[in-house]
Amino acid sequence: MDSIKKKMQSLANETANATARAERWEVEVDKNNHTADHFEEQVRTLQKKIQAMEGQFDACIEDLFNQTIKLEDMEKKHEVSVVKSTPRGETPMPKNKIKALTSYFDQFCDLSA
């Protein structure tokens, strides 16, 4: 009879210990789930920001493309006007020299600013 009581008490203690461990693990799981939810929200926020930035990037690329086309057209018109406006038979300045001088002028302006 004594051995049965001891066995029952031992089983009750083991059950209490197992229940306490299960409760601790449940608390740990809840903490981890809360942390995971927080990180998922951060990921969603970052994804929205990335999508917005991609849209802005696409708009900038499109604007850059359009401005490049306009610039090329203006350069062509300027090149034609340089050729037409050379009085006294002067040799027109080649396009690459115009670009080099423009670049040099821009660098000079940046240094003086």
Image (cartoon, rainbow, N blue to C red):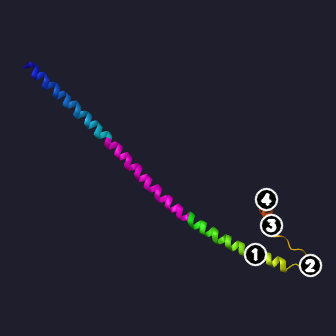
Q: Which residue is mark 3?
A: 96
Q: Which label was assigned to residue 89?
A: 2
User: Which quadrant holds the C terminus?
Assistant: bottom right
Local crowd size for mark 1, using a 10 Å CA cut-off: few (<14), some (14–19), many (≥20): few
Residue 44 located within the stretch drawn in magenta? yes
Q: Are marks 1 and 4 in contact (CB under 8 Å)?
A: no
Q: Residue furthest right?
A: 88
Which amino acid does the dot numbered 1 rest on? Lys
Q: Percent from the top left, x then y, of residue 101?
A: 82, 65
Residue at the spot 43% in from the left edge and 56% down from the top edge: 44
Q: Nearer the viewer, residue 3 or 56?
A: 3
User: Which kind of residue does numbered mark 3 sit on?
Assistant: Asn
Give the quadrant of residue 77. bottom right
Q: Amino acid at mark 2?
A: Gly
- Residue sitting at 39 percent across and 49 percent down? 38
Q: Where is residue 112 shown, x and y percent of the image?
A: 79, 59
Count of numbered circles in the view: 4
Q: CA distance from mark 1 to mark 4?
A: 30 Å
Magenta-colored span: 29-56
Q: Amino acid at mark 4?
A: Ser
Q: Nearer the viewer, mark 3 or mark 4?
A: 3
> Could you tell me which secondary element the residue under label 4 belongs to?
helix
Q: Which residue in the protein does label 4 denote?
A: 112
**Relative to 12, 81 lies left or right:** right
Labelled disc at residue 76: 1
Residue in the foreground of this view, choosing between 109 and 29? 29
